[in-house]
């Protein structure tokens, strides 16, 4: 086999962290989670992007008055605090409502 033909395989740790987010059974670390009323770590105010681990409880959605689903999102923060928040409390993405450039229309 020629070197450099195939891209490097992701590490097992990276695969496990990515797959844990959608695991059907909650990881043990979620048991000590505290409900955050703002979508950030209650201890250090870090965002979910800075979390070490993530798990989304997609097995038990809750339905809102307007018939939308929301899930519990669990985060293990870089400060070692574990918190959760409702997916519906997530702030809007800065990428979601941006105007399209003319170049973007070529891909539609």
Image: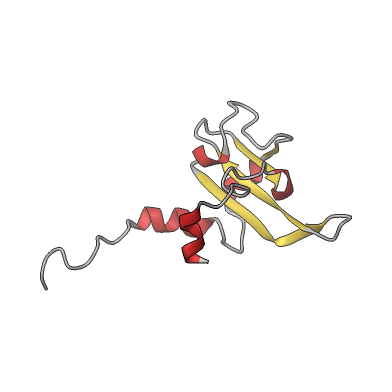
Q: Going 66% across and 37% down the picture, which residue do you hit?
A: 39
Q: How many labels does the image show?
A: 0
Q: 66 or 97: which is nearer to us?
A: 97
- Extreme residue in the front direction: 102
**51 or 92: nearer the eye?**
92
Look at 61% across and 33% down and name the residue there: 41
In the displayed orientation, state which residue is furthest to the right. Answer: 65
Classify residue 64 as left or right of residue 24. right
Classify residue 60 as left or right of residue 20: right
Q: Residue furthest top?
A: 44
Residue 62 place in picture, x, y as percent: 79, 57
Q: Is residue 87 above or below residue 2?
A: above
Of all residues shown, which one is farthest toward the left? 2
Q: Locate residue 2, reporting x and y percent.
A: 10, 70
Quadrant of the image for the N terminus?
A: bottom left
51 on left or right of 42: left
Q: Residue 94's spot in the image, x, y percent?
A: 59, 42
Residue 89 sits in which quadrant? top right
Q: Residue 70: x, y in percent? A: 74, 55
- 50 or 54: nearer the eye? 50
Residue drawn at (52%, 41%), measured in percent from left and top?
49
84 vs 41: above or below: below
> 84 or 100: which is nearer to us?
100
């Amino acid at each position: 086999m020629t070197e450099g033909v195939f891209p490097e395989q992701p590490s097992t740790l990276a695969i496990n962290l990515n797959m844990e987010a959608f695991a059907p059974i909650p990881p043990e670390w979620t048991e000590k989670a505290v409900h955050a009323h703002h979508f950030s770590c209650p201890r250090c105010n870090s965002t979910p992007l800075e979390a070490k681990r993530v798990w989304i409880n997609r097995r038990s959605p809750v339905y809102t008055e307007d018939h939308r689903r929301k899930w519990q999102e669990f985060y293990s923060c870089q400060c070692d605090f574990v918190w959760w928040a409702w997916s519906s409390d997530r702030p809007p993405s800065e990428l979601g409502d941006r105007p399209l450039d003319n170049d973007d229309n070529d891909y539609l």
